[in-house]
Amino acid sequence: MVSSEYERRIAGRFVTFDQDGNGYIDREDFNVAAKALLTEFGTAARSDKGQALYIGAEAFWQGMAGIADRDGDQRITRDEFVNGAVKRLRDNPERFAEIARPFLHAALAVADQDGDGRVTVEDTARVLRILGASEDIARAAAATLDTDGDGKVGEDEIVPAFARYFTVPE
């Protein structure tokens, strides 16, 4: 049985996805996040990177809706999020993270200033701030993601961290 503490932690993650604070997660929340990232990094929405980010946001939304939108109304309530996430995580935490991979891949490409496929810790913190983390948490998390200590973060570090975010106690 999943503990209520675990469910409370998952429920706390809901706020990260509810970008407009209206009490549910929908497609627009993912578009808001994509637009904010493009604005932060000065990337045009119609560019290849911009289009990839919007496509990744849509894939992320579809994946979230597929695991959590029980009533099919194209909105995920806090309860649906908690129950959908808990069920998926119980089955396979890494699989849950994989629904975010296209979005995370595209977000890294937008933030990748030198085109080497990796993002500086500072720019990773910028991405995390745009996605709803506080300044302190964004900086600490970005530094933690740099597992090899080279000052940069890549997809191989981000995707597993996404799964840990939902499965490891704070």
Image: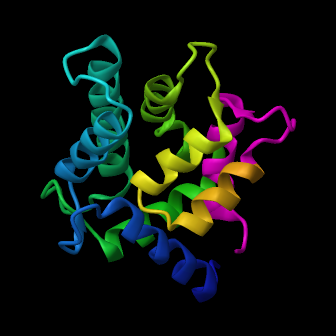
Residue 154 visible in image: yes
User: The N terminus is located in which quarter?
Assistant: bottom right
Q: Nearer the viewer, residue 112 or 76?
A: 112
In terms of image quadrants, where is residue 112? top right
Q: How is the image coloured?
A: rainbow
Indicate whether residue 163 is drawn in magenta. yes
Left or right of 98? Residue 25 is left
Q: Residue at x 69, y 60 (%)?
A: 140
> Residue at position x 58%, y 59% from top?
138
Residue lying furthest left in this view?
73
* Residue 95 percent location from the top left of the image: 58, 42
163 displayed left or right of 26? right
Toward the right, the furthest residue is 148
* Residue 93 seen in the figure: no
- Along the viewing direction, whichever of 127 and 91 lies nearer the viewer: 127
Residue 31 position, x and y percent, is 22, 43
Task: Residue 110 in the image: state x and y as whole percent.
Answer: 43, 26
Magenta span of residues: 145-170
Q: x, y percentage for residue 13?
A: 47, 68
Toward which corner of the image does residue 5 lie, by quadrant?
bottom right
Tell which residue pokes out farthest to the bottom in this image. Answer: 4
**Residue 70: quarter of image:** bottom left
Quadrant in the picture for the C terminus:
bottom right
Which residue is more in the foreground, 2 or 140?
140
Q: From what the image shows, is residue 122 above or below residue 111?
A: below
Count of marks, rendered view: 0
Please report the residue visible at 27 percent of the width from the left and 58 percent of the height from the top. 69
The residue drawn where x is 67% and y is 41% is 121
